[in-house]
């Protein structure tokens, strides 16, 4: 089935968004954590207004919300589409120079900004099915920002397409664009009553045709290692080196299991992802992940045991562990509203495509929204290899996501 989506408009919008640095900042205690997210939000507002969406607001927190009125008459359920404005802090997000590769002919993609950065077919086997497609990469020195600026562009283009085609029936649609999803704060400033939707769909997923119906449950851990710093010339018997103690702590973390480098499928992990400090104090941050939520408590207990062992091995050091919840597996919440996934599957099938239910070793705003009572499966948006300078996107898969959003709106319009 051919698409009538405006491909060039979709591509141009995406290219403009990725060049705005909207990196989330985990060390900043405010929402949003970076001014670039506010800048991108303002651009989103301008684009929504330009395509004819009249009800558009960027609130004091940077969250953008827009409403497209129903064309199918009163009484139809309100649905929401959601994407996040921020990008991962794990790689540089400033100065993005996107590369557009038209009519991809196969083979590895050598990125022009760094000769050592190559998107290989071996690591990205999905490339084999994308010959002739339009691919977008960074130059290899930064993130592309496809996570989740593909989703942002897809949602806006879906609303534009519905406005351009008023004969397509749909109920009320809320578009929601959050901040700081990448650092676990995406829905902190959302008012579910204000959204007022029966279901929501995040467009923050891999490739095409996938519906994420189960995610990791997630906690974050902060380990504070406190020592004693004195001048090294008089350190004997006085200095307690927190850096050495932190190394001992890390050394005791599982390496042959419970680590992301050696796990897949439904296996959970503990992942140290940030360390900073000096002789006197070091702070280590870890991610705790598992599909089975109670196991997170077991991982926290393991960290506490390692802390006590570290204190025994380094007399005078103090090691404190604090954990906090981030999000929970969305599976139970989605089961309570089976239409959320069922209608998405029906909509994609009507486009002549085969939907695939998937589990994802991560989380989205949909995880927290579902936990809070708004069933929110996550849908493909054409992004690949997120959180890496090897990140890339496929325009044709983004077009599929736009068509999917429109078809979902049509399917929900059949309800009264």
Image (cartoon, rainbow, N blue to C red):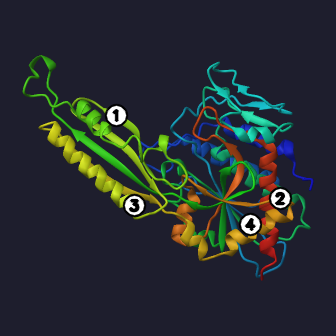
Closer-to-camera residue (44/295): 295
Q: Which of marks 4 and 3 precedes in the sequence? A: 3
Does 166 appear above or below 18? below
Density class for disc 4 (Cα within 10 Å; few <14, some 14-19, many ≥20) is: many
Mark 3, residue position: 295
Q: Which of marks 2 and 3 precedes in the sequence? A: 3
Mark 1, residue position: 276
Q: CA distance from mark 3 to mark 2?
A: 37 Å
Does 147 appear above or below 292? above
**Residue 307's spot in the image, x, y percent?**
23, 46
Density class for disc 3 (Cα within 10 Å; few <14, some 14-19, many ≥20) is: some
- Label 1 or label 2, whichever lies nearer to me, is 2
State if disc 2 and disc 3 touch (CB < 8 Å). Answer: no
Q: CA distance from mark 3 to mark 4?
A: 31 Å
Closer-to-camera residue (286/23): 286
Within the image, what quadrant is residue 78 found in?
A: bottom right
Q: Please, what secondary structure does the residue beneath circle 1 have?
A: strand
Location of the C terminus by quadrant is: bottom right
């Amino acid at each position: 089935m051919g698409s009538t989506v405006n491909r060039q408009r979709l591509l141009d919008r995406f290219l403009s968004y990725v060049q705005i640095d909207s990196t989330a900042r985990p060390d900043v205690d405010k929402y949003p954590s970076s001014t670039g997210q506010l800048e991108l939000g303002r651009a989103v507002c301008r684009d929504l207004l330009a395509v004819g969406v009249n009800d558009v607001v960027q609130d004091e927190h940077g969250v953008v919300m827009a409403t497209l009125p129903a064309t199918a008459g009163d009484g139809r359920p309100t649905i929401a589409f959601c994407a996040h404005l921020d990008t991962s802090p794990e790689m540089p997000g400033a100065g993005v120079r996107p590369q557009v590769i038209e009519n991809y002919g196969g083979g590895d993609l050598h990125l022009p900004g760094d000769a050592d950065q190559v998107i290989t077919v071996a690591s990205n086997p999905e490339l084999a099915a994308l010959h002739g497609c339009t691919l977008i990469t960074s130059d290899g020195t930064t993130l592309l920002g496809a996570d989740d600026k593909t989703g942002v562009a897809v949602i806006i283009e879906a609303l534009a397409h519905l406005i351009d085609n008023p004969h397509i029936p749909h109920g009320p649609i809320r578009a929601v664009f959050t901040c700081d999803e990448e650092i676990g704060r995406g829905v902190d400033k959302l008012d579910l009553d204000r959204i007022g939707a029966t279901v929501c769909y995040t467009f923050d997923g891999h490739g095409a045709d996938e519906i994420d119906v189960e995610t990791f449950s997630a906690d974050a851990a902060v380990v504070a290692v406190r020592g004693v710093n004195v001048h090294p010339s008089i350190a004997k018997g006085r200095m307690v080196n927190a850096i050495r103690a932190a190394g001992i702590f890390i050394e005791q973390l599982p390496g042959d299991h419970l680590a992301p480098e050696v796990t897949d499928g439904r296996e959970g992990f503990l992942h140290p992802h940030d360390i900073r400090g000096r002789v006197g104090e070091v702070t280590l941050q870890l991610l705790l992940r598992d599909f089975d939520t109670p196991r997170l408590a077991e991982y926290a207990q393991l960290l506490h045991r390692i802390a006590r062992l570290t204190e025994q091995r380094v007399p005078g050091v103090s090691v404190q562990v604090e954990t906090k919840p981030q999000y929970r597996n969305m599976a139970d919440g989605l089961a309570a509203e089976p239409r959320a996934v069922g209608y998405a599957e029906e909509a994609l099938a009507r486009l002549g495509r085969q939907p695939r239910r998937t589990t994802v070793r991560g989380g989205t705003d949909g995880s927290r929204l579902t936990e809070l009572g708004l069933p929110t499966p996550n849908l493909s948006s054409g992004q690949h290899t997120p959180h890496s300078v090897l990140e890339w996107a496929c325009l044709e898969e983004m077009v599929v996501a736009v068509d999917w959003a429109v078809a979902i709106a049509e399917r929900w319009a059949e309800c009264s």
